[in-house]
Image: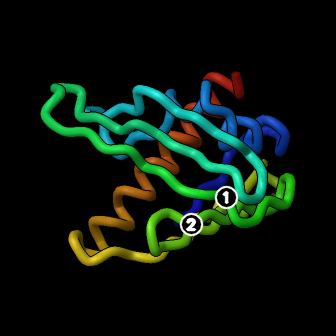
């Protein structure tokens, strides 16, 4: 999954790693939201985002540990027995953000890709329309 954000690298990087921003963009659909986010943004540091259905019917904590952080380039993290990589690259139109992740068994790979892409699309909208907090 990837998107290009029409914003400077510093704003994109900050919005991806700042808990005040994360609660504004981290949801795969309009009927979900992130109610709380904590970030210890360093290799070995933990993160947690409380994701909940807006109707209160379901919620879970998306938690993990940062394994690699290269400022303005790459974030790698582990969540459970899975891994994800977020890459940032300056391009003429702004910053391209690409996410790759280990899939899980419960949902189809298409559902997982759609969900991660929807979150990335909300991230793009947040940065382009509100900037970083």
Element assignment for label 2: strand
Q: Quadrant of residue 84?
A: bottom right
Name which residue lies at 36% across and 46% down. Answer: 28
Would you say 101 lies left or right of 93 here? left
| Count of all numbered marks drawn on residues in the image | 2
The x and y percentages for residue 64 are 54, 56
Q: Quadrant of residue 99?
A: bottom right
Would you say 29 lies left or right of 38 here? left
Number of residues whose C-alpha sits closer than 10 Å to that of mark 2, classed few (under 14), some (14–19) or many (20 or more): some
The relative height of residue 40 versus residue 23 in the rendered view (above or below) is below
Name which residue lies at 24% across and 27% down. Answer: 54
Image quadrant where one finds the C terminus: top right
Disc 2 marks which residue? 78
Disc 1 marks which residue? 66
Mark sitting earlier along the chain (1/2) = 1
Name the residue nearer the viewer: 38 or 21.
38
Name which residue lies at 63% across and 68% down. Answer: 85
The relative height of residue 25 versus residue 83 in the rendered view (above or below) is above
Q: Are marks 1 and 2 in contact (CB under 8 Å)?
A: no
Here the colouring is rainbow
Number of residues whose C-alpha sits closer than 10 Å to that of mark 1, classed few (under 14), some (14–19) or many (20 or more): many
Q: Quadrant of residue 129?
A: top right
Name which residue lies at 75% across and 37% down. Answer: 14
The x and y percentages for residue 10 are 84, 39
Name the residue nearer the viewer: 96 or 22.
22
Element assignment for label 1: strand
Name the residue nearer the viewer: 123 or 66.
66
Mark number displayed over residue 122: none
Rounded to the nearest angstrom, the CA distance separating label 1 from label 2 is 6 Å
The x and y percentages for residue 13 are 76, 44
The x and y percentages for residue 7 are 76, 38
């Amino acid at each position: 999954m990837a998107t290009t954000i029409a914003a400077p690298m510093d704003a994109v990087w900050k919005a991806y790693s700042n808990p005040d921003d994360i609660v504004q963009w981290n949801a795969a659909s309009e009927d979900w939201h992130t109610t709380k986010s904590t970030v210890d943004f360093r290799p070995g540091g933990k993160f947690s985002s409380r994701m909940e259905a807006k109707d209160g019917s379901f919620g879970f904590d998306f938690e993990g540990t940062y394994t690699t952080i290269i400022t303005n380039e790459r974030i790698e993290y582990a969540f459970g027995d899975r891994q994800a990589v977020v890459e940032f690259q300056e391009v003429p139109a702004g910053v391209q953000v690409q996410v790759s992740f280990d899939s899980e068994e419960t949902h189809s790979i298409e559902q997982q890709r759609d969900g991660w892409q929807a979150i990335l699309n909300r991230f793009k909208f947040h940065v382009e329309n509100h900037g970083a907090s």
